[in-house]
Image (cartoon, helix red, strand yellow):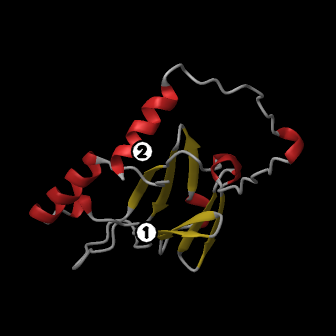
Amino acid sequence: MTMLRFDPFREFDRMTGDLWGSQRTARPMPMDVYRDGERYLVCLDCPGINADSLELTAENNTLTISADRRSNAPEGTRYLVAERPTGTFTRQLVLGDGLDLDNIDATYHDGVLTIAIPVAEQAKPRRISVGRGDAEGHRVIAGESQERPGMKDTVKKLVGSSH
């Protein structure tokens, strides 16, 4: 089962950013995704994000994460260096089938947003028991053996000729 599907547009955007060094393609919410037992965990770094600005929505197997980071500098400030991006940031994850989108849980602690996505019941591996047939369940088909005329002579010739 695959949790994330390949998104060619995101990959193109990443390659363009690598090529041109664009600030626009910087990843303000870098993430890790891994499986922990019966759930997937998505951990996003969101330093400086107010927890009230975080918004998660799940629709049609797409999880959208939005957050706002505002500058604390006074209005009209002239920056000497401005490397910390501000504004609204959005990440979308296309989730694979077999995940329970109705029971997603999220926590935000020390600048890290952790999203737990449980595996749906129907996607969990199940053990299938194999029943044993008993002797009463077997049928014997009765029949008679019939010899075809001339078969004994043919068998004698074949057996006799191999000795």
| Amino acid type indicated by mark 1 | Met
Residue name at image x 81 percent, y 34 percent: 139
Residue name at image x 79 percent, y 50 percent: 131
Q: Quadrant of residue 117?
A: bottom right
Front residue (pair 125, 129): 129
Q: Is residue 51 left or right of residue 156?
A: right
Front residue (pair 139, 84): 139
Mark 1 neighbour density, 10 Å: few (under 14) some (14–19) many (20 or more): some
Q: Secondary structure at mark 1?
A: strand
Q: Residue furthest right?
A: 136
Front residue (pair 97, 77): 97
From the top left corner, tell me how far across and down residue 10 is, in percent: 28, 51
Q: Secondary structure at mark 2?
A: helix
From the top left corner, tell me how far across and down residue 151 is, in percent: 49, 27
* Residue 159: numbered disc: 2
Q: CA distance from mark 2 to mark 1?
A: 79 Å
| Amino acid type indicated by mark 2 | Val
Q: Quadrant of residue 160?
A: top left
Residue name at image x 74 percent, y 25 percent: 143
Mark 2 neighbour density, 10 Å: few (under 14) some (14–19) many (20 or more): few
Q: Is residue 12 left or right of residue 161?
A: left
Q: Is residue 145 above or below residue 101?
A: above
Residue name at image x 41 percent, y 57 percent: 89
| Mark positioned earlier in the residue sequence (2 or 1) | 1
Nearer mark to the viewer, of 2 and 1: 2
Q: Is residue 31 above or below residue 157?
A: below
Q: Residue furthest top?
A: 149
Q: Which residue is mark 1?
A: 31
